[in-house]
Image (spheres, rainbow, N blue to C red):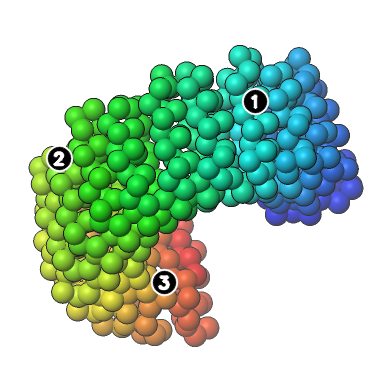
Amino acid sequence: MSLDIHFEQLSDARWTELLPLIQQHQVVRLIDCGITEGRCKDISSALGDNPTLTELNLCNNELGDAGMRLLLQGLHSPTCKIQKLSVQNCGLTEAGCGVLPGALRSVPTLRELYLSNNPLGDAGLQLLCDGLLDPQCHIERLQVEYCNLTAASCEPLAAVLRAKREFKELMVSNNDLGDAGVRALCRGLADSASPLESLRLEGCNLTLASCQDLGSIVASKASLCTLELGDNKLGDAGIAKLCPGLLSPSSQLRTLWLWECDITASGCRDLCRVLKAKGSLKELSVAGNAVGDEGAQLLCESLLAPSCHLESLWAKSCGFTAACCQHFSAMLARNTRLLELQLSGNSLGDAGVQQLCQGLGQPGTVLRVLCLGDCEVTNNGCSSLASLLLANHSLCELDLSNNCMSDMGVLQLAESLQQPGCMLEKLVLFDTYWMEDTDNRLRALEESKPSLKIIS
């Protein structure tokens, strides 16, 4: 049983009503509910009084250091069996981290700890690592993103990685770790027997200098499934250094996130070698990289390689034009594995969308999610898509947000959506405006077809 309350400012009466439920439920999520220090003692008591509680999520509440101290005191109860604790953006600072070692020592059942968006700083992180290193602590997943960390935090984290054989996921994105910090982390991972599955290093001020070390970790850690490196200035030279590790026979990476990494068509060519060779890779993001139509053609050719098993491609804002859509069309007509294609933020226009529809209209296509937001689609493009919705039976979600269609284009889509043979389940139309009559038509359509959601 779970107690889920989001974005509700809890009155005293409502809090009194909820307390018995907090003491009974296995999962308690009170997210952005205006909880402050004064109510942390009640929650602390609940941790001891509810031996069935396995997950507590209090993110986006102003607990502060004093409130966190009260909360963590509850972990000392011998009846506390919590496995997952989420306190992102709760006002925990370095001053409140002194209680972490004792808390982590006292609850051997805790496996997941989420502390992002708290200004711990390097000193607070050191205290956290002191607790993580305790033999009674068995944390497997740690999130410390947006925590004001620098390279100085990476040696303590590396020590944890070396010591804890059960460690599976480290999330340290959006901290200024730099190349020196990541080099320390990679040394820790190289010396570690932990079965790390996920490493998130987005927005960490990395350059090509980190890429060879990261490639070596990918090559040496067959357990590593997810590597997120978005928003780092790796460049084509960095991708060239990363790819040998990705191509290693021992690499089993499934998800690779490289959005906004200053990659051009040259770097895309190196990535395509990986796509052609590694059937384990299922999700790739090159969003926000200026790979252009040349890069699009390279990606499409790779997606037709027999050993490419990619299921999700994010290529938002990559500088594509209508000229590349013939390649996407041919690929979509023949590819039997790609389920999600994100092309938003590219100037495809109606001509490009028409070509995409030709490919997706062929028998046997499998794509389920197509995102074409901000692609300069007008009513003419909507006409092509409306016809596609009747011909294609695999597409479940279509995003056309922030395009140039009028009521006429929206109504053409609605006409197809109301047909029994249309399989679409979600149409996303953010930043799209229409008249009241059209709105009434869309609402009536949703009521008549419960399987369909129109989000605007």
Q: Position of residue 53 (x, y in %)?
A: 69, 26
Left or right: 447, with 99 as reference point? left
Q: Residue at x 37, y 57 (%)?
A: 233
Mark seen at residue 401:
3
Q: Is residue 46 above or below residue 35?
A: above
Q: Quadrant of the N terminus?
A: top right
Q: Which residue is mark 1?
A: 130
In the rendered image, which quarter is residue 319 located in?
bottom left
Frontmost of labels 3 and 2 is: 2
Q: Secondary structure at mark 3?
A: loop
**Which image quadrant for residue 421?**
bottom left
Residue 99 appears in the picture as rendered: yes
User: Cα distance, mark 3 to mark 2?
Assistant: 35 Å
Residue 134's x, y, as percent? 63, 18
- Point out residue 415 in the picture as x, y percentages from the top left corner: 33, 74
Q: Residue at x 41, y 19 (%)?
A: 193
Q: Which one is nearer the viewer's eye here, 321 or 449?
A: 321
- Res. 277 mark: 2
Label 2 sits on a secondary structure element that is: helix
